[in-house]
Amino acid sequence: LRAAAGAAPLFYRAAPVPAAPPAAAPAAVRVPTFALGSLTASRLIQGHWQLAGGHGRYTVEGALVNMRAHYDAGLTTLDTADIYGPSELIVGEFVKREPRAVPCTKFCCFRGLQSIDKAEVRARVVAQCERLNVPSLPLVQFFWADYGVQRYVQVAQMLGALKDEGLIQNIGLTNFDLPRVRQIVEAGVPIVSQQVQLSALDSRPLQSGMAEYCAQQRISLLAFGTVGAGLLSDRFVGAPPPGAEAVRAGGSSLSMYSATASRFGPWSLVQELLHTMADVARAHPGASVANVAQRYALQCSPAVGALIVGVRNSEHVAENARTFSFALSDGEMDAIRAVVAKRQGPRGDVWDLERGVPV
């Protein structure tokens, strides 16, 4: 056994001495908030795509415990979607337990694009409110699968009508390209956000002009994929790329972001990026490569409002929060940008490749 701090060993009798004050615990990093339309949202958002399946097994109660751990760490905003399997229902159960949580969901249109009407839109939104245990959707983010069916502006206006009715508080977009974002905004739909893949490995929101336009229109970019399912982390500095078996074991996320890394360039270029980020991390006590990658995404454009981080488990809660314990200097941003400038891709506008748009 050990004696109390500052006391003599138990087998040695000595005159009492004042106990040394306990070492101060490191201060918890506070995740800041920002105005997302009418909402107060955390700048780190819990991403619950993982509840859709294809990301490993989980239990509902385990997912709820995980949501609580992230909420208590300051990630008070949760991102889900109508296409994420039971995700809305599980998030809704958490909202029942923690009414202060801010659930954000999506309105995704893949089929029946020619026939979708006001009645269908309203019925779907009402069902989402019921699943999420809210009287109105705090933020609904609209996705349209096929630009060839040019009814996305009309359906966005239907969502706008439901906002006027009070069933929706705020409207956002998900993975639209710049020309379509302009069309929807110019049609008078009050857009507050656009969710996009954005990282040092994927510059499409920057190279397309999307970020600049959104900054001008005060539309917040909500960035996902900022650490590429862990590819931009300490684990891969100096390491080979994940093999086919590792990618399969890593689930849908690692599969998607491995493809992004391949488009970025050869693994040697990814390594140059990782080593640059590791050098930057060493200048910030306690920072990791993942923290630097997240800071880069936060600082690459004034349009970026928040990062969406996948929260499969609670292992990275404290590490994610540490992203807000420091900022990158202009020189550090320039060092990362110098490597990013060597990229071979991904080319095109937001989500062009995923839609099969030639680039």
Image: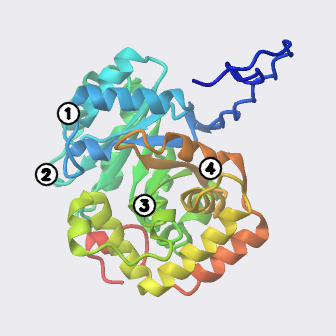
Residue found 47% across the figure and 60% down from its top: 227
Are there few (<14), some (14-19), or many (20+) residues within 10 Å of tag 3?
some
Name which residue type carries label 4.
Answer: Thr
Which residue carries the number 2 mark?
112
Up the image or down, 30 lies above or below 280; here it is above
- Near-viewer residue (333 or 155): 333
- Residue 148, image quadrant: bottom left
For the point 46% across and 25% down, the residue is 101
- Dot placed on the residue nearer the N-terminal end, 4 or 2: 2
Check if mark 3's residue and mark 2's residue have beta carbons within 8 Å. no
Alpha carbons under labels 1 and 2: distance apart: 13 Å
Q: CA distance from mark 4 to mark 2?
A: 42 Å
Q: Label 1 belongs to which residue?
A: 119
Few, some or many residues within 10 Å of mark 2 (<14, 14–19, 20+): few
Cα separation between marks 4 and 3: 15 Å
Corner quadrant of residue 74: top right
> Marks 2 and 4: in contact by CB < 8 Å?
no
User: Could you tell me residue 180's position as x and y percent?
Assistant: 41, 63
The CA distance from mark 3 to mark 2 is 36 Å
Q: Which is more foreground, mark 3 or mark 2?
A: 3
Task: Check disc 1: other Cα within 10 Å, few if <14, some if 14-19, many if 20+.
Answer: few
Reading the image, the residue beneath label 4 is 323
Where is mark 3, residue-wise? Answer: 230
Which of discs 1 and 2 lies nearer the camera? The answer is 2
> In the image, residue 147 lies at what x, y percent?
28, 65
Per the image, label 3 sits on a secondary structure element best described as helix
Residue 4 on image: x %, y %: 69, 20
CA separation in Å, label 1 and label 3: 42 Å
Q: Earlier in the sequence, mark 3 or mark 2?
A: 2
